Amino acid sequence: MEPMVSKYKHLYMNAKNLSWVRKMDNYKKMNGVKSLGQYMTPRFVAEFMCSLISKPPSASVLEPGAGEGVFLEVLLEKGFKNVKAYEIDSRLGKKSPISITYCDFLKIPPQPIYDVVIGNPPYVRWRNIPEGWRNLFKKQVYWRRIMNGLCDLTYAYIYHSVNFLKDNGELIFICPLFWTETLHGKHLREYLSKHGSIELLINLNEAKVFEQVSSTIIILKYVKHAKLPYVKIVEYRSKQPVTQHVVNRLSSLIRDLEIHSREPSFYIDDGLYRAYLCEQFVGNEPWHPIPPTEKIVKEIETFCDVLRIGDIAEIGNGMVSGLDIAFRLDREELKELNERERNSLIYVYKSGTLERFLPNREPIPYIFTNHISSGKELEQSYPYFYQKLSRYRERLRQRYQYNKDIPWWHWVFLRNKGLFERYNMKIFVPSKERYDIRGYFRFALIRDEKNRTFYATQDVTAICVRPETGVSIEYILGLLNSEPIQRWIMFKGFSRGGVHDFSEEPIRHIPLPRINWNNDNEAEIHRLIETVVKEILQHRKLDKIDEVNEYVVKLIELKKDARIFQQNLDVYGKGYDF
Ligand SMILES: C[S@@+](CC[C@H](N)C(=O)[O-])C[C@H]1O[C@@H](n2cnc3c(N)ncnc32)[C@H](O)[C@@H]1O
């Protein structure tokens, strides 16, 4: 079955003229694993995935990157004969009599003509995708909706494949997890939630499916233009590889979820496997399913009355020297400086210097030279700076230049220097953070000293609370370090492979209960949180965090009660004249 020419035809026809098409031959000769994502699916996994198809054997099926045809083999055994398969690499062997069309699937104009798309899309990092292809992704409107310089081929494949599905058609893919939770995966997630629902998400966590792949792998079933209230979630949480036995257990858990498909509180957790229903993902939010046990996250989510950090704070990532080792000074070196040099130092917090509530050490002195306009001035007036930076001159010249001609003694990107100077109190957080290392995320209050501003390098992001918002920075600090908000970040924040992203946009979305100042109880809790946080800051009494947690939980309950009260008023109040 050859797809008919669609409204997208012109895009593909233009592409034919591009010189990169000629380069495809060379491309095919490149290492297939790296550039074509050739990780073949074990047969028992293909069998399991085919068992997830709800359509009858007469359904039309597409396998968009067939490899050696393991899915084709299984599909045929199950009676599916109306199968179309594409594969770019004609050198691969063939396991099934179903014919394979050897061409570039991404150049086939999309037509919604299949009941099922099934397979294992190629995973190829952006830098390994041939340049011509990358240019196409950047230039064509069709691809630009989804693709950017941080995406890989999986994104393109999922997007393109969905566009081949009929209404109620099913996409069943095995692929890496990361695009479901990263910031740059948001366009794809948004596209998917706009055009359908996720029926099933199996997270295999650290268990290996493919020999050479160490990424977290998921199996996904998506139904186009269906509106399903819940996603069936099944998790396998073991370091042991996925075997036939594991997929049998996954199948039986899916059956359990089907039986209990109207019970959102249904939950199985035997330590190795977890199965539950979670509400359908909406918009571009990360697909972090919230188990029914995480009540607090749900409660925060269902508030009608939350502030987002972005509503009350300016957020900015730290400055880039381009070569920290050249600019960073130790205590001994400070003795070598003349007065002018001492006056040109800046004091910087790096991610390693941060802890919960407070930094764990003094800020680090850094050479700052961006006001020095010539190498001569540097040499004559700042002799120690000159001597130190000269040692790294070649490496400094090779730094990324941000399309500018940056003198070798300058920092390459001052980014939010002005922001750090405008606020003398700010909250710093490592811009990338693993929760599992410490069991918490670190938000630290940074207070400038008299005449000394503190800055951050690019591994840190600053949250600067606008003074006119009326909430105290201690209250915000307490909430950010509290268990409920940290659970929210874990489940709803952006991450990749367990590393949470605290760049500007993810931070902007973090919710905080909005204090209703007319409600004495809420105002009192604000005061209590502020007081405990001040104590923690003053005496480094970190054990007081339990008190903060209690108050935050209380505040969330108050908000919930207020909401229920309001809802009741809305329902029962109707028709009465008060
Ligand atoms: C991860 S492998 C999966 C192969 C097979 N479906 C399986 O599960 O064993 C992805 C396959 O997609 C093929 N591929 C990569 N880019 C392609 C493209 N643009 N068009 C068609 N096939 C492509 C690769 O050569 C590779 O065989």
Image (cartoon, rainbow, N blue to C red):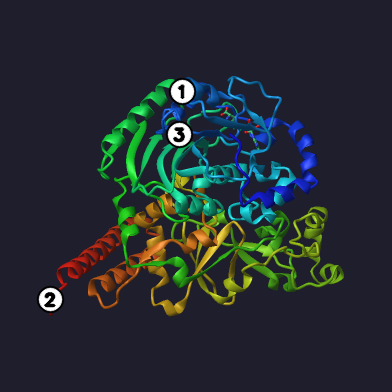
Which of the labelled discs sits on residue 256, or is there none? none
Residue at left 32%, top 71%?
Answer: 515
Residue at left 14%, top 74%?
Answer: 575
Q: Confirm or reject: label 3 Cβ below 8 Å from ligand 1.
A: no
To which residue does mark 2 refer? Answer: 576
Callouts 3 and 2 close, C-beta under 8 Å = no
Q: Where does ligand 1 appear, by image quarter? A: top right
State the SS at label 3.
Answer: loop
Q: Which quadrant of the figure has residue 420?
A: bottom right
Which of the labelled discs sits on residue 79, or is there none? 1
Q: Which quadrant of the figure has residue 402?
A: bottom right
State the SS at label 1.
Answer: loop
Between the C-alphas of marks 3 and 2, the distance is 54 Å
State the SS at label 2.
Answer: loop
Q: Confirm or reject: label 2 Cβ below 8 Å from ligand 1.
A: no
Between the C-alphas of marks 2 and 1, the distance is 63 Å
Question: Which badge, 3 or 2, comes first in the chain's sequence?
Answer: 3
Q: Amino acid at mark 1?
A: Gly
User: In the image shown, does 299 or 24 lie closer to the viewer?
Assistant: 24
Please say if 257 is above or below 460. Answer: above
If the image is split into quadrants, where does the N terminus sit? top right
Q: Is residue 21 left or right of residue 553?
A: right
Question: Which badge, 2 or 1, comes first in the chain's sequence?
Answer: 1
To which residue does mark 3 refer? Answer: 204
The percent position of residue 310, horizontal first and vertical second, equals: 47, 68
Q: Amino acid at mark 3?
A: Leu
Please say if 154 is above or below 317. Answer: above
Instruction: Please say whether residue 281 is visible from this viewpoint.
Output: yes
Instruction: Please say whether residue 497 is visible from this viewpoint.
Output: no
User: In the image shown, does 435 or 498 lie closer to the viewer?
Assistant: 498
